[in-house]
């Protein structure tokens, strides 16, 4: 199975077979890796794509789950880099400068993506590296660009991409670390804010181990531990960038938290929590995708201790309350506004 951007690479595979060391950044969860030359490394910030590629590929060591690409031990700089278009232009700048820092002199940077991802105007971002940007090919609503940077590359450090914003929710103030590509870059999401305002009067009474499911930059976990420092917070997210930010958010607060990458509950499946709080995902890449949250609802009861509680924010046009009722046998709407409902369920 190949997605459209990967099919465009397949059409142009000879260009990549000629390369002696290739860095591939952010490919989708498909079988492209099996037709790429077995040289260099493939990096991803998405654990879903990482696990898919590892399960389908014989060269496991080549696929790395990292927040930023690095030169692999014993390797030199790369002759070419192939970047898959990320969700935002800010994240594209991040990947591009990461790629530039790892590229040999006179090396090529390729960028592939779909029209709906904004690939048509992405050449302008590539042009900031000083070289000409050429269109290699277009097909299946996708374009493949190439450039040979003329500017001198600067060393790449993820720390240079961190920004911090101050969040104020219900008299609680805390700093949130963010980097491009992480949900709600530079501001608290309005759904998350409404969720936190709605649970604020209850948090002081919470006890034990709580999970911030799909934690992003750790906003929910930070609010909870700032309100009730006795809570033991764990956070999971599929994005290495999100986990990086959530850890940094806790460092900024001087608080302890346990953040790990996980596709859904996969990497915490043996644990049971006193409570779960979530603003769950509704996208895969740029496409709307409710399946992750539906799977979350199905499994959430089993992740709770007896009398454990689940709090969740959802757009009010979704029927998650019905799905929650089927799983838990109870659901209460503890708050609602024109856009969102806040649901509470108990594992009783
Ligand atoms: C709506 S955002 C909420 C982020 C954060 N809790 C907040 O309120 O700012 C959803 C998060 O789900 C993560 N996500 C998407 N798919 C996932 C999956 N399969 N497993 C775990 N997390 C996932 C995304 O990376 C994103 O950070």
Image: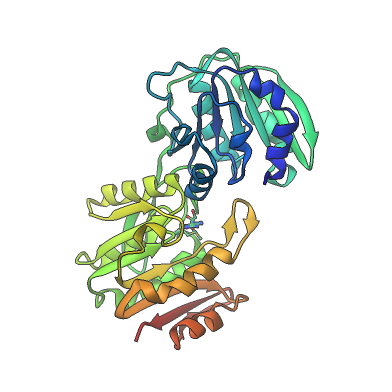
Can residue 84 be seen by looking at this rendering?
no
Question: Which residue is farthest left?
Answer: 230
Position of residue 191 in the picture relative to residue 170 (left or right): right
Front residue of 75/293: it is 75
- Identify which residue is drawn at 34% across, 87% down: 348
Quadrant position of residue 6: top right
Find residue 72 and report its image quarter: top left
Q: Nearer the viewer, residue 30 or 83?
A: 30
Vertical relation: 104 (above or below) 334: above
Give the x, y percent position of residue 316. 58, 76
Outermost front residue: 58
- In the rendered image of this protein, does residue 196 appear above or below residue 135? below
Count the marks. 0
Name the residue rendered at 60%, 13% in the picture. Answer: 150
Extreme top residue here? 105
Residue under the point 60% across and 44% down: 28
Is 257 positioned to the left or the right of 7 in the image?
left
**Viewer-proximal residue, 265 or 141?**
265
Describe the colour scheme in one phrase: rainbow
In the rendered structure, the answer to whether residue 335 lies left or right of residue 115 reads left
Q: Position of residue 209 (x, y in %)?
A: 26, 68
Percent x, y of residue 24: 56, 31
117 over 192 or under it: above or below: above
In the image, is 248 to the left or to the right of 329?
Answer: left
Percent x, y of residue 263: 46, 56
Res 105 visible:
yes
């Amino acid at each position: 199975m190949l997605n459209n951007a990967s099919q465009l690479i397949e059409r142009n595979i000879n260009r990549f077979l000629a390369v002696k060391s290739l860095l591939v950044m952010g490919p989708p969860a498909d079988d492209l890796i099996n037709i790429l030359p077995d040289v260099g490394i493939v990096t991803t910030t998405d654990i879903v794509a990482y696990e898919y590629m590892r399960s389908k590929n014989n060269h496991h060591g080549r696929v790395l789950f990292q927040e930023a690409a690095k030169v692999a031990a014993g390797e030199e700089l790369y002759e070419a880099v192939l970047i898959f278009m990320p969700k935002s232009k800010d994240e594209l700048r991040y990947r591009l400068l990461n790629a530039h820092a790892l590229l040999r002199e006179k090396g090529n940077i390729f960028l592939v993506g779909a029209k709906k991802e904004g690939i048509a105007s992405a050449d302008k971002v590539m042009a900031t590296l000083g070289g000409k940007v050429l269109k290699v090919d277009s097909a299946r609503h996708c374009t493949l660009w190439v450039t040979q940077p003329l500017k001198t590359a600067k060393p790449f450090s993820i720390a240079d991409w961190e920004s911090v914003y101050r969040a104020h929710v219900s008299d609680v103030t805390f700093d949130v670390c963010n980097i491009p590509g992480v949900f709600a870059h530079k501001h608290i999401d309005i759904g998350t804010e409404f969720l936190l305002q709605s649970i604020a009067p209850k948090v002081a009474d919470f006890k034990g181990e709580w999970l911030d499911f799909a934690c992003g930059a750790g906003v929910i976990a930070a609010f909870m531990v700032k309100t009730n420092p006795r809570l033991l917070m764990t956070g999971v997210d599929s994005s290495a960038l999100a986990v990086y930010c959530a850890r940094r958010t806790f460092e900024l607060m001087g608080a302890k938290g346990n953040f790990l990458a996980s596709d859904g509950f996969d990497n915490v499946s043996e644990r049971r929590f006193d409570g779960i709080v979530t603003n769950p995902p509704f996208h895969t890449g740029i496409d709307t995708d409710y399946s992750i949250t539906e799977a979350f609802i199905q499994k959430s009861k089993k992740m709770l201790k007896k009398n454990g509680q689940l709090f969740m924010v959802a757009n009010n046009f979704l029927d998650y309350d019905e799905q929650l009722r089927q799983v838990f046998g109870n659901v209460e709407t503890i708050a609602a506004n024109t856009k969102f409902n806040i649901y509470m369920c108990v594992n009783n």
